Image: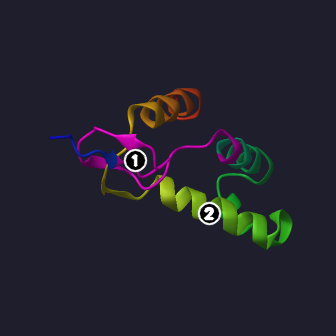
Amino acid sequence: MSEIKNKCQWCENESDMPYTYHAMGPLQEKYELLMQGFEKKYGSKWYDKGAEIGKELLDDVLFYDQIVNTVGRGIVCVDCLDKDDKVYTKFKNNE
């Protein structure tokens, strides 16, 4: 009898990890750098600066921010967890 593999929610590769609680998507360096830049240039309320940043880019960054701050039950593989941890350590560990 073969073991049934589940799929990682983030990369869709097969995984034998159990269901646990995770963010709905992984941290991404590209967006973390954008948010840091926005905060430096526009201050802590950068999300209200749609005219200066551009509506499409701001919507994209806010969507990303919502995904990484919404938690749900799912499966995330070890590789994705390792990548996410590296980005977390780089950008969020000092907050």
The mark that comes first in sequence, 2 or 1, is 1
> In the depicted view, which residue is nearer to us: 54 or 74?
74
Q: Nearer the viewer, mark 2 or mark 1?
A: 1
Confirm whether the magenta stretch covers residue 28.
yes
> In the depicted view, which residue is nearer to us: 7 or 85?
7
SS state under label 1: loop
The residue type indicated by label 2 comes to Leu
SS state under label 2: helix
Counting from the top left corner in percent of width and height, residue 53 is at 82, 63
Q: Which mark is residue 8?
A: 1
Q: Residue at x 24, y 48 (%)?
A: 19
Counting from the top left corner in percent of width and height, residue 3 is at 21, 40
> In the depicted view, which residue is nearer to us: 41 or 16?
16
The residue type indicated by label 1 comes to Cys
Q: Which mark is residue 62?
A: 2
Q: Quarter of the image holding residue 90?
A: top right
Q: Main secondary structure of the magenta part?
A: loop
Q: Would residue 13 be found to the left or right of residue 62 on screen?
A: left
Bounds of the magenta segment: 7-31
Residue 67 shows in this picture: yes
Quadrant (top left/top right/bottom left/bottom right) for the N terminus: top left
